């Protein structure tokens, strides 16, 4: 579905760092896990921040827990955390809902995230589920971003070519996935290779016309 004057048929969004400022929630989640595992991390280390903010949960666990038994303990504990308790730490990005209102009915909307099941809770709590025709998560793919498979699955769902969609992301993982899938990439508040950079969500509207 694409409305009059639209040069693209779909807009695909990453979640964390694009739809929401979710750094506080991510920190709280992994602090709980690491505390349970008696593991101390430098939460000011840019590499720690990058890993927990951009990679799928299972990749994060593989990075920090080389021992399979310890990794399974950490994964099991993580599964007991009620993500609803962390949602108050998330903040929707300014202008995001207004931009979705402008896009809805003109292009198809989708999400491509390295979150797993928590995305459903987040969308429900913020009242955003109705906007998105397809939500691709790490739980639905054995090869999460930066592999192109999640984006290719979205294109296949809609029956669109790669050049008929835009992917809006904020990390190198997103940019790499877009490049591998040959989907035009829009960097949100980040200096990354792609077709454009935007600092406000409403700037996307001029790109699709």
Image (spheres, rainbow, N blue to C red):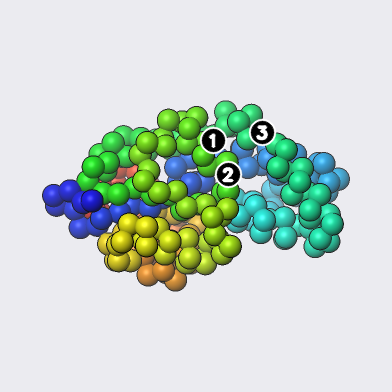
Task: Name the secondary structure under disc 1.
Answer: helix
Who's the residue at 66% across and 59% down the image? 59
Counting from the top left corner in percent of width and height, residue 190 is at: 45, 54
Q: In the figure, residue 181 lies in which quadrant? A: bottom left
Q: Residues within 10 Å of mark 2 (few under 14, many from 20)?
A: few
Q: Which residue is mark 1?
A: 121
Q: How many marks?
A: 3
Residue 71 in sight from this viewpoint: yes
Q: Earlier in the sequence, mark 2 or mark 3?
A: 3
Q: Which residue is mark 3?
A: 82
Counting from the top left corner in percent of width and height, residue 138 is at: 56, 54
Counting from the top left corner in percent of width and height, residue 1 is at: 23, 51
Counting from the top left corner in percent of width and height, residue 80 is at: 73, 38
Who's the residue at 57% across and 32% down the image? 87
Who's the residue at 84% across and 57% down the image? 69
Query: Is residue 169 rendered to the left or right of residue 184?
Result: right
Q: Residues within 10 Å of mark 3 (few under 14, many from 20)?
A: few
Task: Name the secondary structure under disc 2.
Answer: loop
Q: Given the current orientation, which residue lies at the most extreme left position?
A: 4
**Distance between the alpha carbons at the discs numbered 3 and 1:** 10 Å
Q: Are marks 2 and 1 in contact (CB under 8 Å)?
A: yes
Q: Which residue is mark 2?
A: 117
Query: Is residue 182 rendered to the left or right of residue 22?
Result: left
**Distance between the alpha carbons at the discs numbered 2 and 1:** 8 Å
């Amino acid at each position: 579905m694409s409305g009059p004057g639209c040069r693209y048929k779909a807009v695909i969004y990453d979640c964390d760092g694009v739809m929401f400022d979710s750094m506080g929630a991510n920190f709280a989640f992994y602090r709980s896990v690491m505390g349970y595992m008696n593991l101390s991390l430098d939460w000011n280390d840019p590499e720690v921040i990058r890993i927990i903010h951009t990679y799928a949960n299972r990749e994060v666990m593989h990075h920090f827990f080389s021992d399979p038994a310890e990794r399974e303990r950490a994964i099991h504990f993580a599964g007991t955390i009620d993500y609803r308790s962390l949602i108050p730490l998330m903040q929707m990005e300014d202008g995001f809902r207004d931009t979705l209102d402008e896009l809805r009915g003109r292009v198809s909307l989708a999400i491509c995230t390295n979150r797993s099941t928590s995305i459903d809770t987040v969308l429900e709590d913020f009242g955003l589920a109705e906007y998105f025709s397809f939500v691709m998560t790490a739980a639905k793919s054995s090869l999460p971003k930066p592999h192109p498979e999640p984006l290719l699955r979205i294109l296949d769902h809609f029956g669109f070519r790669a050049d008929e969609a835009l992917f809006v992301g904020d990390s190198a993982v997103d940019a790499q996935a877009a490049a591998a899938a040959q989907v035009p990439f829009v960097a949100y508040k980040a200096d990354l290779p792609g077709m454009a950079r935007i600092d406000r969500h409403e700037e996307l509207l001029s790109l699709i016309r």
